[in-house]
Each structure stands twice: as C-alpha cells, then as structure tokens.
Image (tube, grey):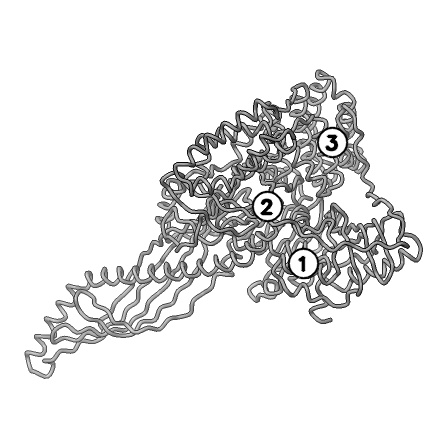
Amino acid sequence: MNKAKNHSPIWPYLAILSCLFVLSLTAPRAWQRKARQPQAGTQPTAGTRQRGADELHAQALVEDEASLESTDAVELAPYAADLRATQSPRHVREVAIEPPAGEFASEVRDEPGMPPAPAPELRTTRPPKAWPLEDVCLAPDSTLPGLAAPGTLVVEPAPRTPALLAAQPARSDVPKPEKGPTAASEADAAPDDLLTEPDYPAAVASSSWPLPRRLLEQLSNLAHEDPYLVWPQRAIELVHRLSRESDQPESTRQILEALDRIENGDSLMPAADPALEGSIVRARYALRRWLDLWESAAELHDVPLEDRIDETEAKRITALLAEFDALAAENPAEGSAWREYLELDALAEAAESPSGQARRDAARNVLDRMTSRRLSRSQRAFLDKAPLATLREQLHGWAAEPITSERVLRHIEQYEHSGMPSDAKLVVEDLRSLSWSAPEQARQLAKYLDAHYRNANMRVAAAGELLNLFVPQPGRIEAQVRDTVVNVPVRGHASTFTRLSIRLVPDERRIRLGLEAAGTVDSNTVSTAGPATFRNTGQSTFLVRKLFVLGPQGLNVWPAIAEAENNYSYLVSLETDFDRVPLVGSLIRGIARSQHDEMRMVARRHTERKVAERALHELDNEVQQRLLEAGKKVEEHQVATLHRLGLELVPISLQTTEDRVVARARLSSGVQLGAHTPRPRAPSDSWLSLQTHQTVLNNGLQQLNLDGQVFELDSLFQRIADKLARPEIAEQEDLPEDVRVEFADKDAITVQCRDGLIEVTLAFAELRHAGSLWRNFRVRTSYVPKIEGLSPRLVRNPDDTIHLEGRSLRGKIAFKLRAIFSKVLSPNRQLRLLDDSITDDERLRGLQITQFKVEDGWIGLAYSPRRVSSKVARKPE
C-alpha cells in the first residue's frame, strides 16, 4: 500500500501525540510556569485530609522567582570534585500497576502533585513579546533563547521605555473564528432529529450531592471481584448515605470521617489476589479525590457567595482606571501599550454598562492577561505595583460568579462519568469562579479542583543508558602541531580521540545533566632550542565537564570545567649542530640534555594547561552551536505548532535520579483540564517510558476548532495540515467524494482510553453525500494497540465495527452511511505513534517494547533492553 494511503482521517489527535513525544524528548527551554517538587517516600492518599489545600500547594510548588545561582553554584562544587568518579547505574523500582500496592503507592506520589495556582487564560491572546533571540550566555543564570513558552499569536513587541514602566505590553490581535460554508436547505431533507446523547444520564438536579457514578462503579467491581474485601461495600453504603444526608452538617461530618478511616486504613490491606492491586489503587485514589472535594464542599455549603457586580464596585474600578491614566500620561507610548494589551478601554465601557455579564467577561479578560504565564519577570513586577495591583484585586469581585457547592460537584461528577470536553469546560469555569471568590472556603475548593483535575497529562522518563546511546561520538582527529612550550617553538603531529557521555546528577526539582568529554592526545613533536633539536613522543589525557540544568525558568548552561594530565613524554632523539665536532659535540649534547631534564616538569605543566584549555574551548564552542541549532529547529516546528493550536506545555515536575530523568507536564490551553487518574507503571527495567492521558488528545482536538464548522473532506484535511504544519496530511487517497460535513456544536471529535481500547467518536450535525442528507448522528469505532518490532501502532479493533448513533439512522440509510465511514476509517490504515526515523534508528536495535497498554484514560508505552526468555521450568504456584 502506498504511503499516502497510510494517513488516517483521525490523524489530528495522533499527530498531537507524536508532537508531544518529540517535545518531551527535546525538552523546550523556556517553560515559564511553576513546576512542582515531587514528594518522595509518601503515599498519595494517606493523611491528605490532615493537610489543608494551602499546605499541599506550598509543598508542591517550586518558586518561579527564585534564582538558580545560589543552589546551582553550591551543587556544582561536588560535581567538579567528582570528575573521575564512576557510577554503576541501578534501575529505579518503577513497576506496573499490577504489582503489590505498596510499591505502586510509593511511586504514585508524583501523580496527585499539586498543579500551580489556578490562573488560566481564557482568550487566545499572547502577552508582551519581550524576549528577542540572544546568544547563549555561558553563565549560571543564562537561559537558552528561542524556545519561549507556546502561545497563540505572534505579535510585535511593544515599545520599551524603562523611564516609566518596567516592561512593555504587546499588541493582541485576536482573529475572528473561522466560519465554514453554510449547508443549503433542501425540501426533502430528513427530519431535524435531536442528536442522541450517549448513555450518560445526568445527575439529578437537587440540593443533595450527586452520586459519583464512576467511583461507585470502581468500588462495586472490587466488591464483586473479591468478596473478602469488606471496605468497598462499606464505602458504597457510606457514599449513598452521604448523598442523601449532605444537607445535614453533623451527619456529613461523621460520614466523611468514616470514609477517611476507610481510605487511610482498611483500603491499605492487601487483596487476596495480587492482580487486583491496580484496581485497588485506582479506587483508593478516586475515593481520596472525592473526599477532598466533599470536605471542601461541606465547608462552603453554608457560606454565601455574593455577586459583587454593583455600582459601588464600578465606581472604584473607574477611579483606578483614572489613576492609571494619570500615571500613563507621564509616558504616553508605554502607557498606551499597556492600556491596549490589558484592553482597559473595554473594561471602562463595561463599567458604564448595566449588564452584569458584560462586566464579568471584561474583568475575566483583564485578569487573564494580568496573570499570563508569558509575562516576563519585569512585566509581572510592574503589574504588582499600584494602581494595577489594586485593580486586579477589585476585578476579582466582578470575575467571580456565585455558584453552589452542589453545582460544582454535579459538574465534576458528570465530567468523570462522560469524559467529554464540553463537561470539562464546565469544571474549568467553576474552578475560575471559585478562585476569584472572596470566601477562603471557595478558594480552597478551587485549589483542590486544580490539584486533582489539572494534573500532569503526560510523563516521559529516560534512563541514562538511553541518553548515552544518542550522544554523537566524534571520530579521531589528526592535526598538525604548531605551538610554543616554555618559549620554545614546537612542531609536529597530534592525534586526539574523545569519548562523550552523559552523567545524571540527582536533583529533586530539575533535570540536571553533565556532559563529559574524556580523551587522549598522542603527539610526536620536534622542538629546537639554540643548537639543539629535540624529538619527543608523548601522551596526555583530559576530562571536560559541562553542566546543563533544566528548571522552571528554562535551560541554564554552565561554563565547562576541565583538567588534563600528561601521562608521559619521552625524548626520542637529540641532535645538535656540533654533533660532528669531537669533544665539543658530546659536551653540547650533555648540556642540552641536562637543560631538557630541568625543564621537564615546567614543560609538563604547560602542556597540561594547553591541552585542558583547548579541550574546554572546543567543547564550549561545539555545544553552543548545537544548542542554537536545536533551539531554532524546535522553535520553528514543535513550539510553532503549539502556538497555532493555542496549547501550552506546562511543567508539573522535573526530576533527576541516579538512573533516569523524569519530566511530568500538562498540555492544555488555559480553559482545559489535565489528568485526574493514576497513570500506569512502566516496567522497572525500562530505558524509555511514555504515558499520555486522553486529555492530551482531546485538548488538541478541541483546539482544531472543528465544533460547528462545515467542510468538504479535502478542505477538512487541509485545515488540519495547516494547523499542524504537515502538508502531507492533505494528500489523502481512497476517500469518498462529494462528501460535505457539518460537525456538531460541541465535542466534534473525542477520544476515550479505557479497557485496552482507544475509542474515537465523531459527532455530526449534518452530512451530505450524492443527494442524501443525514442529520444529528455520531460515528464511533475503536482502536487497539499493536506492536510491530519497535513501532507502536494503533489498528482498528478487529472485534469491533463502525457504530452509528442517531434516531434518524435506520435501514438502508444507515447502510449507506456506514459504507462512507468504512472508507474514511479504513482498517487498512495503521496509525503510528512514533515516527519511523525514531523506531528505525540502529541505536535502538537492542531494545524492545515491553509495555503498550491502554487503561483508565492513559496510554502507556515503554522500551526496555531485550530480555532473554528463561527456559527453566517454574514450579507452579
């Protein structure tokens, strides 16, 4: 089958996944969101209730404003002192979810880590672009340029006038959403049936708390699979009672305490069947998640949330705008730039408007811009000063929307059950409103929402052995020697052999790598001093180390350090101009040899210094050039793609152990969620492991802006190709002709990862083909993992077919529609998760895929060294 036929019509989400993997490996250097520090040695669920949300937040955040100079300078000293030390790598105990819960629980601690404080961006705007490309600065606080955090629009930097303002804002020109062509009306069109929703019954609207169906399903499955486990059934009874009695504070408190005892005690007991340990961990974590929400909701239950959109607040905001105008008048250019970036004119108009919603929308827009992660430190410092800091506090009252705890819990429950992006959006809106609300109880509930539902949705871990496989090794270098040693000219030939390697330097908060260049220099030289000519042969060794630290502020490149040692230097021959003169010749040779021996140690030290300086200089120059090239390539491709999609890759935690580097991040826009379930464990001997949550795929699909849009099939693929900068996507073959689609107003394309399947659903408001018209239906099919050598692929599930959902789809009409999507979603198209350039690399021949699984919203992939199967029979257990 030709190459063009291998592209799939659901390529967008897989392309985003592939892009994500590449970004994980290349580690973009200008992440500007606070990272989190993983908590080692503690279980993710035990004792969480005893700590408030503020404490959890404080322990998890890495201070974005802290300078790297002090910590990095201290840690560089032992690193330099240990130049010749060697370490024998040990594999981290990183087991899959099936092994005993104790091991899994200790590993899962980094999953429910607290994300940064909720300050998401609603509008697709880009803050001031105040960071031009610069040369790499080889200093501890230097940041590799060219890889700024992804945004949405490319804007010109605003004028910089430090006399008045600390930094400049940027122009934000937000494009209008694209409109597809409107389908023509037909007299003989089918009835406009409402789109049949999937079987996700909404929670009953009442003053009681909703029943968490997903949690109850997990507990019921445990109780059914192991009748000896008593705590799941007890927890089910308490959850039902809590829903009925949530309006009774004392009863609610007692039930929550009982559930907390189960979560911290009974649920830690091992199951009779070790295969259930994974299910127990997931159920226990889900119970902990709901306990945090219920406890915060109970505290918020009796606290009134007031709507502060009134004329008094409007007058205060108007006064603050006038105060800013007076300050900006001192420097009109800078003041105008800031006013334009913050859209203060629109805020002033909203203050005059009687519409509460208009004021709320304007306030949220300004707050989003004030808290943008793309602002520089100097710009944030300016916004933290009056009058803008005061304005920000006043706008919180306008931005907050009075909501009840029952509404929040209902939206969360619906999202957990359906997984739909449209339901996720409701949770984000609740989170934003609560984070801006005045009562502390509301803000604490917002922190728990942010902690549990905007968690990392991707993780990559790479062993040091794998990193060293991809370190380019220079060949032997032959060079002429023209130098001066101890004021004596030296000529000859030198052969240099260098071996590069990566050294992992443990760090709980950053990725810290040392690049080592160890080599030897063999030389044959001739030197002339006066009447004597010396021929020498020698060998020197050198070791150069350069430190790279990737943290929340970007990539910091330290100056290289080097040392060299002259192993030996032999005088091969000595000739003088008086060798043929009797008596005098031998006297001159004796004097020359004596002087040579006297200067031997001085010459040795001089040689060692020269070798070290040359090796250091060459490594610094080579690294600087390669970093600039890599930064430019990533900026032009991966980061630019995230810009077009309006996505940001926000680091959640970065860590370096003795054996591997681990990065956890969230790929989303400001109004999208991350993961909320524990990820699968990679095998303990894996060299490379990747875990991706379905929110990565759904977030990317949502940012394609297909909801409600109308396309011909060719224009649809062209739209996707333009968004992803992959022109080959538009070159599709074997697609049905004369097909015009209009996607549904929400959840146009969604992905669900569960029970070993990746389920893809396409929702249409209308489809026209060859005079036929179908309205309001869904198309659903599933894919399963398949391993072909080192290539992980997704193939159409052979045990599944194409499902059509919609009340108007019956008989021959459904048959014709099924024939169309049998071509669009052809089982002959295998979807690759990694590019062939990676899986066909000869350096990976010694690896094999040891994990490729889909469960509980996650796709887990791991590569390990090839395992030798044991031929010894095992005794049955």
Circle 1: residue type:
Arg
**Residue that sits furthest to the bottom in the current view:** 580
- Residue 104, placed above or below residue 793: above
Mark pair 1, 2: CA separation: 18 Å
Asked whether 758 or 463 is in front, the reply is: 758
For image coordinates 68% across by 21% down, the residue present is: 301
Instruction: Identify the secondary structure beneath mark 1.
Output: helix
Give x and y (percent) for residue 549: 44, 48
Query: Image quarter for residue 376?
Result: top left
Residue 719's label in the rendered image is 1
User: Are discs 3 and 2 less than 8 Å apart at CB?
Assistant: no
Going from N to C along the chain, the mark reached first, 1 or 2, is 2
* Quarter of the rendering containing residue 205: top right
- What residue appears at the point 71 percent right and 46 percent down from the top-left corner? 855
**Is 609 located above or below residue 431 in the figure?**
below
Residue underneath mark 3: 410
Residue 397 in percent (x, y) is at: 58, 27
SS label for mark 3:
helix
